[in-house]
Amino acid sequence: MSADNTPIEDDLPEQLRIRREKRAGLIERGIEPYPVSVARTKSLKDIREKYTSLDIDVATGDIESLTGRIIFKRDTGKLCFATLREGDGTELQAMFSLDKVGEEQLDSWKSDIDLGDIVSVTGEIISSKRGELSVLANSWSLAAKSLRPLPNEHKPMSEETRVRMRYVDLIVRPEARAYARLRPTVLRSLRETFHNQDFIEVETPMLQVMHGGAAARPFKSFSNAYDMDLYLRIAPELFLKRCVVGGIERVFEINRNFRNEGADSSHSPEFAMIESYQAYGDWRSIADLTRTLIQNAAMAISGSHVVTHHDGRQANLGGQWKEISLYEAISQGVGENVTALTPIEELKKHATKLGIKIDPKWVTGKLAEEIFEHVAREQLIEPTFVMGFPVDTSPLVRAHRELPGVAEKWDLYVDGFELATGYSELVDPVVQRERLVEQAQLGAKGDLEAMQVDEDFLRAMEFAMPPTGGMGMGLDRLLMALTGLGIRETILFPLVKPEE
RNA sequence: GGGCCUAUAGCUCAGUCGGUAGAGCAACGGACUUUUAAUCCGUGGGUCGACGGUUCGAGCCCGUCUGGGCCCA
């Protein structure tokens, strides 16, 4: 509870100390700096919408109580002005005149109230002599005292300060307010698209006894109650497939995954993932679903399929999207026919010629993917489904119905980066067990990203899983693709190292 | 992992050749009843990221570390 006589540390910076002194002064005079409630009859937005075209110097006769954070303050002798701002950025001017509020209240306004304070102002809605829509105070009260000064409104905060103090960023920067509202808009659109196609949303475990569903290093934790290691999930895939076995034929989950790997401008250790499975579908039906999800999301945030990338280029996400074959793209890139059956020695020659640094741990398929990324990068700017990945890097995917060594897996590239992936899912439990055992052997040899043999998952598969198409898409990356923002702008509170 | 850049007032940034630390906004005191980045007069505010070194003397030069950014792998 707030003690009246808490000593104010004198080693504080001047401005912080002065504000603490003002708070203490208010309490001393019996004024609560953090009242439990204040008068509020309308939002600033309500007022803006109600009075759209008042003439200059009009008094409406309407009395309202309004609240907002003070972002500008212009104190003159007997008539003071302030600009109030509320959470969505709507602003309204408040006016305080000597003849309405009296000398004591006007003096208090000037000396007790600072930029950043939140106040409630009760008075008539008017337009000023300059035509500014305003509330002319009959009375006012403090709603919450700010003990820290706001940053300079007119110079943008440095990127680090924006990320470390997002709450301040949201107060001062319109883009921050807009970006914070993008994600929920996209989420609502995604859920609507899923809902319209009879997909059911589920929530599956984040703490897992066994991690699986992707090639990635997990975060490890420990449960005291169960006395065992637990992992933060790297993907929900194996649980969503259990759902399909159980008859939830169209299922999706939008939730966080955690990967204990590098962080850079397009990777965050925790990131939101959309995964979806469609029984009696395949890689093509799930590609259609993915395209619809993305196009509807683009429409939801910009009213169009045309989106703007980070460098200002515009891209049209409308219509059907280009498809290229991974092995055909490689063949074109190296000038020789390359298939999934091409021996690794030959791939290594191609890679060396292209100047790719080869990691000796790479399997044949991984090498092919690296060559592909190297030769096809420029072809992946417009939305493109890259069809037919090597089967040995896709342990949860069904083999291609015609091409040997290839899996029915696509990656969707937009603006040069991988946005989503989709499969015809592997549903044969015997083959699935063989693939996972292979993975476990890689893991035993030191591959930290290899999958484990999940016996319960295999048992579920053995109860028969219908033919299924599945997809996964990073939500943060989707936002980046739709807006051109960096990943730290799409995430409200990205992980930052502590300041001290 | 490698390279480059960066850290100075509450915020955004200057700081020349190594010689007493600067600006704008913000703050404090004063004037002002139509301002809107209000204006005018005056004032205060700094562990220059941390630690070490060179030097008579370091914000500046050197080393190590920490935070942040960019590029490459």
Image: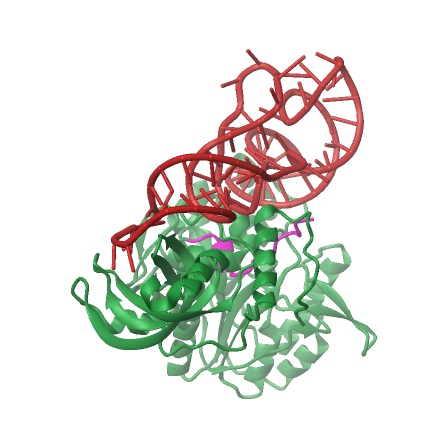
Chain colours: A green, B red
Name which residue lies at 34% across and 57% down. Answer: A78
Q: Residue B68, relative to residue A446: is it above or below?
A: above
Q: Is residue A492 magenta?
A: yes
Q: Is residue A12 visible?
A: yes
Q: Is residue A477 magenta?
A: no
Residue A179 spot, x, y in % from top left: 42, 60
Name which residue lies at 42% across and 51% down. Answer: A328
Q: Which residues are magenta?
A: A485-500
Q: Is residue A133 left or right of residue B68?
A: left
Residue A439: name its quadrant: bottom right
Q: Nearer the viewer, residue A199 or A440?
A: A199
Q: Is residue A323 visible?
A: no
Residue A375 spot, x, y in % from top left: 45, 43
Residue A335: name its quadrant: top left
Look at the magenta stretch and give its main secondary structure. loop
Which residue extends farthest right? A227
Q: Residue A53, relative to residue A325: is it above or below?
A: below
Residue A350 spot, x, y in % from top left: 53, 40
Q: Nearer the viewer, residue A303 or A143?
A: A143
Q: Is residue A50 left or right of residue B53?
A: left
Name which residue lies at 58% across and 72% down. Answer: A237
Q: Is residue B56 left or right of residue A478?
A: right
Q: Nearer the viewer, residue A220 or A340?
A: A220
Which residue extends farthest bottom? A247
Q: Residue A255, relative to residue A15: is it above or below?
A: below
Residue A82 spot, x, y in % from top left: 37, 59
Q: How many marks?
A: 0
